[in-house]
Amino acid sequence: MAMTSTLTSTERQIGMALSILLVCLGLVMAGVAKQGPMMVHGGMAVALGLVLVFVLGGALYDQPEPSPERLTQYDDAPIRFGIVMTLIWAVAGMAAGVWLAALMYWPEATPPWPATSYGRLRPVHTSGVIFGFGGNALIATSLYVLQRTSRARLADALSPWFVLIGFNLFCVWAATGYVMGQTQSKEYAEPEWYADLWLVLVWVTYFALYIRTLARRAEPHIYVANWYYMAFILVVAMLHIVNNLAIPVTWGAGESFTIWSGVQDAMIQWWYGHNAVAFFLTAGFLGMLYYFLPVRAERPIWSYRLSILSFWGIVFFYMWAGSHHLHYTALPYWVQTLGMTFSVMLLVPSWASAGNAIATLNGAWHKVRDDATLRFMFVAAVFYGLSTFEGSFLAIRPVNSLSHYTDWTVGHVHSGTLGWVAMIVFGAIYSLVPKLWGREDMAWPRAVEWHFWLAVTGTLIYVVSLWNAGITQGLMWRAYDEGGALSYSFIESVEAMLPYYAARTLGGGLFLAGALLCALNCRATMCAAGDRVDVSDRPLVAQPAE
Amino acid sequence: MLKLHYNLEKISMGLVGAIIAVASVGGIVEIAPLFTIEETVEIPADMRPHTPLELAGREIYIREGCYACHSQMVRSLADELDRYGPYSLAAESAYDHPMLWGSKRTGPDLARIGGKYSDSWHMAHLIDPRSVIPVSIMPAYPWLTRALDTRLIEDSLATLARLGVPYDADMIENATADALAQSRPDSDGAEGVRDRYGEDVPLRDFDGDPDRLTEMDAVVAYLQSLGTLTGEARRLMAEEDE
């Protein structure tokens, strides 16, 4: 097993103890709940704990101690696991998305079971892609980048496994909870209180691992990518805790009421919601961009000053922007105005980042032309620039009066998530997979090119069709005839959406096909793993054994 | 400045502290004052909390993810007032933990849906949306005819009371009985529901099946309550029109 081979027997014993604790936790959850999703989730924890006990226990007897040689190398085994989970969640989460898109013009296809209805599957898609796909990619790449830019091995061998396995348990709890009807209904924060608490535990370990590893760095300066990853870890923790404060109805019910209500809840929810976009879907991925793009292009970051400006600009401005989700609502007017103002100002640091990334490619444009992996990263930077422009534009009050509640918002989100987030992840994956599995290149280099064009075409079809959909909706809702009556009933606006919903399903389908091709390509690469080692890719000083 | 940053980047905990400090400002400025506004935004005198049956319906509305396609927030825009009714007031969702303002209208806003359609229309629509609106793209919810699970109702009211929703001890104690009684206008408990939640609370068999208390009863009772918990929004609208 990849996991156990790098663990010493002491670490295996501690790991076993932790796994037994997980079994106990699962038993308590199942015992207190006695029924419903919380009991099922307890059962999952028991099963996972038992598997880990057997794996680690087996290794204690069968596997030799890892050689001290490992301490002179980076700890990449958990990163490989994280990449595999990223690919699994990508396919699962995007497939859910395409299926839901299809249901929007073919609602009769909804099976007659509660578990598969649109409303329950929708958070499976959003959590699956944001947390499953995006989260695993962020954790895996952050640990990779952290070690390389610090020239130090991870501070210990167990906690990366705890973070990755624990995070995936959270994702599985979330997705299975939704289909069983368990949700807090707060968008992008749907999991119930015990899953939220578990995530806090995982996150604190993640942060501690990050800081402890930074403390071992052989470089005096902390590289830009790590600032972004740290902002991602810290601010997501802050947002997650405040937005999820809740009182359980009973200890065993797996249901709770958020302590916030009404207008305060709305503000806190969108302070969370918009900054989940900022610090989960932007800051972390900018960290990825700031490492993988210069490395792949073999060019240094264009401007150090600009990266400082854009980093602090993003950390400061974004936190004010959430209230633009609540224009013309019962939220006090001055808060809406602040949200709008800061959203517009946010364009400055956003374009500084995008421009910095694109200018870094100066002198390497021939590589962008020839190398689909670098092209993924370039397109990501372009879509980042486009989406942030669109975001600032949509935050302006009168524009928002047209766009809000329509599919334009959905189109905007997907221009960011497909065009920017997913593209930079694929760029990072195609850079990492050959390296981590000891090969020169991907198993099927031509398939990367195919994936690139599927992804770009899919994104464009998706985004353009939902622009049309959203603007049409917004205009139909506000149209009056000469007599001063509304021109269209609501259902007429729904009918007008159908061609766009069909087109967006096609776009999503193409994107999913590309992701599937990527997963298969990675699988082929992993199955044909080589023994190529980059001798310079190692910590600067051998770390003492703990 | 550049020099300062040059040094800051060498201290990991310095970066951590700076990130937390810089990121906190926006939230503090925008969110903290909202908790004092609570005192200035007055809860209308006629505002009532949801009955236990409506609350159970709300939980089903959340469970099925209805909020993903239906907003409950009429914005102060002319076409929305004409289409849906008076714009939503902050007070109207003051007892909602969490609020269900929503972010997308794949279907219409529901903040003023209460009383707009009959119970039997809602029932037919939920079981098969296309039987009443042929081009609707809403999914069907045929399983809502199953029995309502009332085990958590009392604890739910008690929890909400702890969070400041005005449920008194009497309401909490009778929560389960009231849920049943609201759907049985001729039963002995019906009078108690009126006493506790007001004369205007609808007492009727929402799903047309007098023998069973179903999830449909709860969902329809909830939908019919939307926009009716206080008359304040309509009163304000009427004043503005004068």
Image (cartoon, rainbow, N blue to C red):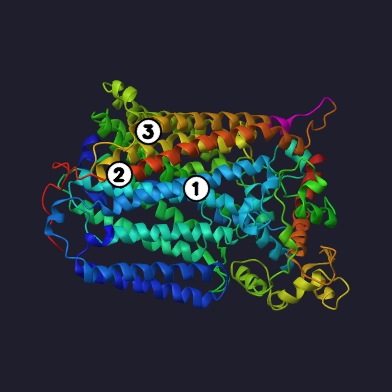
Label 2 neighbour load within 10 Å: few <14, some 14-19, many 20+: many
Q: Which residue is mark 3?
A: A448
Mark 1 is on which residue type?
Gly
Region in magenta: A473-482
Q: What is the chief secondary structure element of the magenta stretch? A: helix
Dividing the image into 4 quarters, which one contains the C terminus of chain A?
bottom left
Number of the label disc, if any, that sits on residue B216:
none
Q: Is residue A477 magenta?
A: yes
Whether labels 1 and 2 belong to a single chain: the reply is yes
What chain does badge 1 belong to? Answer: A
* Residue A21: image location, x then y, percent: 36, 73
Q: Is residue B197 left or right of residue B165?
A: right
Label 3 neighbour load within 10 Å: few <14, some 14-19, many 20+: many
Number of the label disc, if any, that sits on residue A93:
1
Q: Nearer the viewer, residue A22 or B98?
A: A22
Q: Nearer the viewer, residue A242 or A178?
A: A178
Residue B19 shows up from this direction: no
What chain does badge 2 belong to? Answer: A
| Element at label 2 | helix
Whether labels 1 and 3 belong to a single chain: the reply is yes
Label 1 neighbour load within 10 Å: few <14, some 14-19, many 20+: many
